[in-house]
Image (cartoon, grey):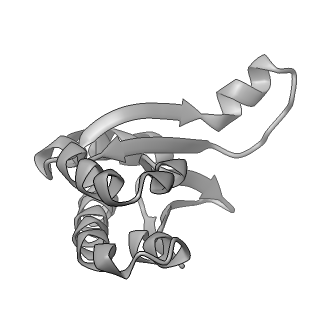
Amino acid sequence: MLITLSSSKTVADVVTALEAAIPANQFGLMQIHNIKATMAKKGVEFDHECLIIELCQPNKAKQILDQNISISTVLPCRISVYEERGKTTLSTVKPTTLIEMFNAPELAGVAQEIEEAMVKIMQEAAAG
């Protein structure tokens, strides 16, 4: 269900690398959510670095949404980068798993293409 990679880089360095890897792989960087900072603004102490990066490949998204607009509930794609016990982790839900949840076998090929690209992006960002 998840694709998870470890990195010897810091969370900040992985996010910087993602900011380069995403457009280099024909995806667009949509938003970066800093969970720790957001919680702090709400008066909640959270001890872990955790950033959620939203990314999209518009042509693939259109292809999916044209066939099943309810899949919009799980878009855009997300990569979570977090620190836990001194390790930096990158993680995402497999697009192929998400497509299966919507019982949309006609979109399995597109989901596989997106998944392969996301793995490549994550590997490039995690590389030391």
Number of callouts in the render?
0
Q: Which of 112 and 122 is in front in this view?
A: 112
- Asked if 115 appears above or below 70 in the picture, the reply is below
Q: Where is residue 79 in the image (x, y as percent from the top left)?
A: 45, 53
Q: Viewed as shown, does residue 86 lie left or right of 46? A: left
Task: Residue at 27% x, 65% y: name it.
Answer: 114
Q: Where is residue 107 in the image (x, y as percent from the top left)?
A: 31, 72
Q: Viewed as shown, does residue 55 lie left or right of 71? A: left
Task: Residue at 23% x, 60% y: name it.
Answer: 124
Q: Nearer the viewer, residue 6 or 108?
A: 108
**Which residue lies most toward the front here?**
67
Q: Which of 19 and 14 is in front in this view?
A: 19
Residue 89 shows up from this direction? yes
**Residue 29 figure quarter:** top left
Residue 13 shows up from this direction? no
**Residue 86 figure quarter:** bottom right
Image quadrant containing the N terminus: bottom right
Q: Nearer the viewer, residue 1 or 111?
A: 111
Task: Residue at 58% x, 52% y: name it.
Answer: 82
Q: Viewed as shown, does residue 93 lie left or right of 116? A: right
Q: Position of residue 54 (x, y in %)?
A: 43, 42
- Asked if 11 appears above or below 2 in the picture, the reply is above
Q: Position of residue 128 (x, y in %)?
A: 29, 61
Q: Viewed as shown, does residue 14 lie left or right of 41? A: left
Task: Residue at 25% x, 39% y: name it.
Answer: 28
